[in-house]
Image: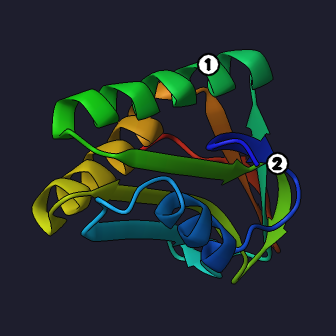
C-alpha cells in the first residue's frame, strides 16, 4: 500500500495507522486528520460531493508535500490518502497520518499538510444539493 494515494474507494484509518507504525519503533507520536463530507454547507443541504483531480499532477504534488513535511518537521513517516469520485454526506474524504519521535512535530506536520494540500493540490470539489450542483472555491 503506497504512502500517498488517490483512490475512489474508502480507506481504513486503522490500516493506515498500522502501516505507519510498522515503519519504525522510534515513532513516539502519531497525529491524524480525517476529513469527512458534511451534509450542510453555506446554507444548503449537501447530499453528495464529487471530487475531481488532475491525477498525475495531484499525485506528484501529494508526494512533494509528504517529502517536504518529513524534512520540515523531521518526521519518521507520513501517509496521505485522498478520495476522488463521488462521496455521500458523512463519508471519509481525506486522511493524513504523521509519525515522529515526539508529539509536537507530528501534530504540527499534520496541520501543515492539510492546509498545504488544500492550497496546492489540484483536486476540485463539487457539492451536489437539492438546488443543483456547484463547484466549491478552495478555502484552507
Tell me where residue 8 appears, x and y as whole percent.
Answer: 87, 53
x and y, in percent, of residue 37 in the image:
64, 72
Residue 100 drawn at (x, y percent): 26, 55
Q: Nearer the viewer, residue 93 or 3?
A: 3
- Name the residue: 44% across, 48% down: 78
Residue, x 50% and y 53% (percent of image)?
A: 23
Other residues around mark 1 within 10 Å, as few (<14) / some (14–19) / many (≥20) = few
Asked which secondary structure carries label 1, the reply is helix
Q: Residue at x 20, y 39 (%)?
A: 74
Q: Which mark is residue 60?
A: 1
Left-right relation of 17 to 88: left
Measuring 54% from the left and 22% from the top, which residue is drawn there?
61
Instruction: Please rate how many residues cluster around mark 2, counting C-alpha atoms within 10 Å: few if below 14, some from 14 to 19, many from 20.
Output: some
Q: Is residue 45 visible?
A: no
Residue 7 badge: 2
Direction from residue 8 to residue 126 in the image, left or right: left
Give the mark, 2 or 1, whose residue is nearer the N terminus: 2
- In this view, 89 is above or below 48: below
Amino acid at each position: 500500500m503506497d504512502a500517498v494515494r488517490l483512490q475512489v474507494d474508502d480507506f481504513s484509518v486503522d490500516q493506515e495507522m498500522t502501516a505507519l507504525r510498522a515503519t519504525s519503533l522510534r515513532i513516539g507520536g502519531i497525529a491524524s486528520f480525517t476529513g469527512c463530507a458534511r451534509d450542510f454547507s453555506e446554507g444548503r443541504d449537501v447530499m453528495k460531493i464529487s471530487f475531481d483531480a488532475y491525477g498525475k499532477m495531484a499525485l506528484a504534488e501529494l508526494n512533494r508535500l509528504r517529502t517536504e513535511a518529513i524534512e520540515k518537521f523531521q518526521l519518521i513517516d507520513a501517509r496521505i490518502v485522498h478520495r476522488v469520485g463521488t462521496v455521500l454526506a458523512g463519508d471519509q474524504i481525506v486522511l493524513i497520518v504523521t509519525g515522529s519521535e515526539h508529539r509536537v512535530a507530528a501534530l504540527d506536520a499534520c496541520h501543515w499538510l492539510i492546509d498545504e494540500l488544500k492550497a496546492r493540490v489540484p483536486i476540485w470539489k463539487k457539492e451536489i444539493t437539492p438546488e443543483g450542483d456547484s463547484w466549491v472555491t478552495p478555502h484552507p
